[in-house]
């Protein structure tokens, strides 16, 4: 039954069953990588975001959005494809100020919006899971000039994978809490290919940083770009 459902729905369903429904503490920092404590803080999104409006694409249970809203005074809209994730996010953090959670496809949310945002980000979220030739121009359209897009994706060489040799998605897996692996499509680009797609969309790559686990295996690629 799970294998027929959306992998991200199955993922949310098992996480909901495994995790507490009561409000969770707001994390101390935004985590961009798989190694808590490594990686930059919120400064990557731009200087002084207080009272600015920011969107997270693929927010999951909302911990990073909650941190930005509560500890940095940012108005955050967390978007996730799966309604169950949004329910999880609201049950954990819905009581907090400056925070809105919306269920929907990242691309559809951006296309339906007529707002200009001060930053857009994704932490292993929708960027890399939606065709970049569609999603990046939609992001560029909704970012104010000079403002930042930042996103982390699994490093294209983690787990002995290879970066894509063309612009098509490759096959990856979502691993559920019960260890079931469900196939998904992922655009596994290296920094150079992200740079090409960002430029086409009207964004300029400002940094591409690699992060490793304790054994120096690359795990995370963190990219930031500026709207021209
Ligand atoms: C690996 S989880 C990461 C969640 C969260 N950002 C975190 O750091 O824990 C990926 C999330 O992206 C969401 N997602 C996948 N495709 C999406 C899309 N097209 N639009 C919005 N969210 C999407 C999934 O439902 C899932 O919650």
Image (cartoon, rainbow, N blue to C red):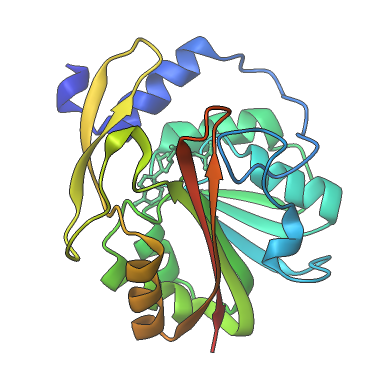
The image quadrant where one finds the C terminus is: bottom right
Q: Is residue 145 left or right of residue 110?
A: right
Q: Residue at x 35, y 10 (%)?
A: 178
Q: Is residue 25 above or below residue 50?
A: above
Q: Is residue 135 left or right of residue 41?
A: left
Q: Residue at x 81, y 67 (%)?
A: 51
User: As drawn, which residue projects farthest toward the front?
Assistant: 216
Q: Is residue 103 left or right of residue 27?
A: left
Q: Is residue 114 visible?
A: no
Q: Is residue 22 above or below residue 199?
A: above
**Residue 71's spot in the image, x, y percent?**
85, 47
Give the image quarter of residue 93.
top right
The image quadrant where one finds the N terminus is: top left
Q: Residue at x 22, y 19 (%)?
A: 2
**Residue 123's spot in the image, x, y percent?**
53, 48
**Residue 89's spot in the image, x, y percent?**
59, 35
Q: Residue at x 40, y 76 (%)?
A: 198
Residue closer to the observer: 77 or 187: 187
Q: Report ligand 1 position as a quadrant.
A: top left
Residue closer to the observer: 189 or 77: 189
Q: Is residue 98 above or below residue 131?
A: above
Q: Is residue 3 above or below residue 217?
A: above
Residue closer to the observer: 69 or 215: 215
Give the image quarter of residue 133.
bottom left
Q: Is residue 11 visible?
A: yes
**Residue 70's spot in the image, x, y percent?**
82, 46
Numbered-mark total: 0
């Amino acid at each position: 039954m799970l294998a027929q459902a959306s992998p991200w729905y199955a993922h949310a369903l098992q996480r909901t069953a495994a995790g507490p429904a009561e409000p969770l503490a707001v994390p101390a920092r935004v985590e961009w990588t798989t190694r808590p404590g490594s990686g930059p803080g919120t400064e990557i999104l731009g200087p002084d975001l207080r009272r600015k409006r920011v969107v997270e694409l693929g927010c999951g249970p909302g911990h990073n959005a909650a941190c930005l809203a509560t500890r940095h005074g940012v108005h955050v809209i967390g978007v996730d494809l799966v309604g169950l994730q949004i329910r999880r996010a609201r049950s954990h953090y819905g009581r907090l100020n400056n925070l809105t959670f919306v269920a929907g496809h990242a691309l559809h949310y951006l296309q339906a919006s007529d707002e200009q945002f001060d930053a857009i980000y994704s932490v292993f979220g929708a960027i890399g899971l939606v065709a970049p030739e569609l999603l990046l121009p939609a992001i560029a359209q909704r970012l104010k000039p000079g403002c930042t897009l930042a996103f982390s994706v699994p490093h294209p060489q983690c787990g002995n994978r290879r970066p894509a040799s063309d612009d098509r998605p490759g096959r990856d897996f979502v691993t559920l809490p019960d260890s079931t692996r469900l196939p998904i499509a992922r655009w596994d680009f290296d920094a150079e290919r992200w740079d090409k797609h960002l430029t086409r969309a009207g964004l300029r790559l400002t940094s591409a940083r690699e992060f490793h686990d304790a054994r120096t295996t690359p795990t995370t690629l963190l990219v930031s770009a500026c709207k021209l």
